[in-house]
Amino acid sequence: METVKTRGSSLFPSLWSDFFGNEPLFPAQWLSTGTKELLPAANIRETRKAFIVELVMPGFEKEDFVIDTDQNILSVRAEKEEETTGEDERVTRKEFAYKSFARSFTLPENVNCDAIEASYKKGILKLDIPKKEVSTSLPKKEIKVI
């Protein structure tokens, strides 16, 4: 014998999921605004003389990047607007895309912020962050009694 659903349950959600599964009615790409915000993957290595940060950022040009330091925070940002146009006898089509990202890193105190270098090749943004000598012992200082 088949059981009948009662109070607190609905037949509609069951039928809906039977036919359509748990997938959304409209895929996310249909609702996209054309704006893509990225959080690029980062590799961070430490050598004896420097920290090396590599960010995977294909599709950008070196002029698209803004890199700066403020206090002990290293910030990397980029944005790019792309427009493609296709024309035919009767159809004109334009597509726009906007890509941007911002990523920040807290730098240790043994970093020489004035000597950071950046390069961009084959979709990889590479930051060379040299270390500086940090004195762990304070120099001897004589204090005069007045």
Image: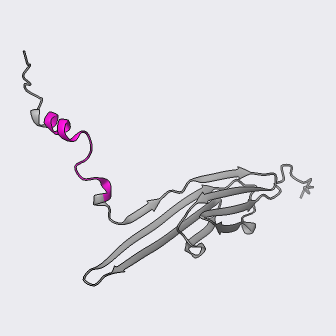
Q: Residue at x 72, y 64 (%)?
A: 113
The answer to whether residue 38 is above or below residue 21 is below
Residue placed most toward the observer, 41 or 72: 41
Colour scheme shown:
one colour
The percent coordinates of residue 86 (x first, y second) are 35, 79
The percent coordinates of residue 133 (x first, y second) are 83, 56
Q: Which residues are magenta?
A: 13-29
Splitting the image into 4 quarters, where does residue 97 fall? bottom left
Q: Residue at x 76, y 55 (%)?
A: 110
Splitting the image into 4 quarters, where does residue 88 fall? bottom left
Q: Residue furthest front?
A: 89
The percent coordinates of residue 40 (x first, y second) are 54, 57
Q: Residue at x 32, y 65 (%)?
A: 33
* Image quadrant occupied by the C terminus: bottom right
Splitting the image into 4 quarters, where does residue 42 fall? bottom right
Q: Residue at x 54, y 69 (%)?
A: 60
The answer to whether residue 22 is above or below residue 103 is above
Q: Residue furthest bottom?
A: 89
Residue placed most toward the observer, 26 or 52: 26
